Image (cartoon, rainbow, N blue to C red):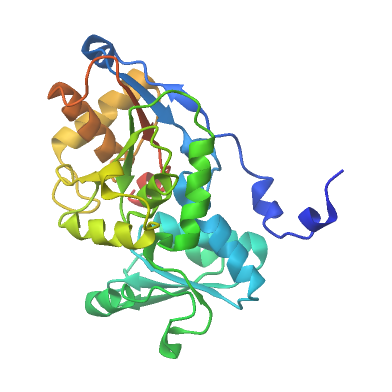
Amino acid sequence: MQEPELLDNPLVVIENQLEKSTLEKVNDPFLKTAGVNLWMKRDDRLHPIISGNKWRKLKYIVEHALSVQACTLISMGGQYSNHLHALAFVGKQLGLPTKAWIRGEPPVKFNSTLKDLVDWGMELEFISRSEYRELRKIKGHDGLPEKYGVGYWLSEGGANPLALRGVAELVLEINEPCDYFCLPCGTGTTLAGIASTGTGRFSVLGFVVFKGGAYLEHEISALLPHQITPESWQLNLDYHFGGFAKTSPQLLAFVDTFMATTGIMIEPTYTGKMLYGIYDLVKQKHFKKGQNIIALHTGGLQSIRAQI
């Protein structure tokens, strides 16, 4: 029988929908020849909507928002944002109003992501890129100027120290020996959550998915506890393919080949770029024979549908 306090926790509504995130060996002749073992942490299987790292980052933020009796959850993102897509769904499930500031001019026709946000009751406001940059500077949940609305503020991508706690739980699910833990990086919050565990079991390697991402080193360091040294994690800036959500024929061909070879569905914005980088580093013999790599599938498959 469940404890009474568990039944009183609104987050149980979400928790009861989650599936198990498994660790799956990537069977690819290329990797076998190279002598490198690659495992995929299948966080894309957690939930059909809030898959990947989305719920992990939101879990304790939303819990805190509920504890302070927040009237509205307010955040920001682009027109294909996985973060806003997850936030709108969570708000709908919990009966908590949501609002988002969207970068750029409102489109003539809403894509599938924006349609979902509206269908789930999220209030949308479109904002100039310069004002969007100003919003990025607001970090505290209660630091949002009143002109942007009254409610609980979530930084872009859920970049909040509370998000680290949810992401850190992912490490507890991994028993396989690991030399490198690889993941794609947007805001760097998920990397900070993994690195915050300070287990020393593996090196954390983040693949930045947009151009000019060197500043993430500062952002990640600011999120991490002081005892976590920079030597335990690093960023790779070489596989952004020209910018966020930008691709190339080489990247798209790699994504298609990877899916055909492994049967694992990925998208080219986050997980695809990370895997391309991993495979390229394998070719360069960056990884030694016999080493074990775990790559995090951060979900976000809705973005493929959104761009149709």
Asked whether residue 96 is in view, the answer is no
Q: Is residue 68 visible?
A: yes
Instruction: Name the residue at the front extreme.
Output: 227
Q: Is residue 113 left or right of residue 247?
A: right
Q: Position of residue 124 (x, y in %)?
A: 44, 74
Displayed quadrant of residue 91: bottom right
Q: Position of residue 154 (x, y in %)?
A: 45, 69
Which is more toward the observer, 152 or 118? 152
Based on the displayed image, in which of its 4 quarters is residue 284 positioned?
Answer: top left
- Relative to 186, is 101 on the left or the right? right
Location of the N terminus by quadrant is top right
**For residue 102, above or below residue 34:** below
Residue at left offset 48%, top offset 46%: 168
- Would residue 15 be found to the left or right of residue 29 on screen? right
Q: Measured along the vertical axis of the image, is residue 91 above or below residue 192? A: below
Residue closest to the far bottom: 147
Above or below for 53 versus 223: above
Which residue lies most toward the right here? 1
**Identity of the residue drawn at 22% across and 27% down:** 279
Nearest the eye: 20 or 226: 226
Front-most of 119 and 69?
Answer: 69
Callout count: 0
User: Measured along the vertical axis of the image, is residue 290 above or below residue 133?
Assistant: above
Which x, y percent locates residue 127? 31, 78
Give the quadrant of residue 159: bottom left
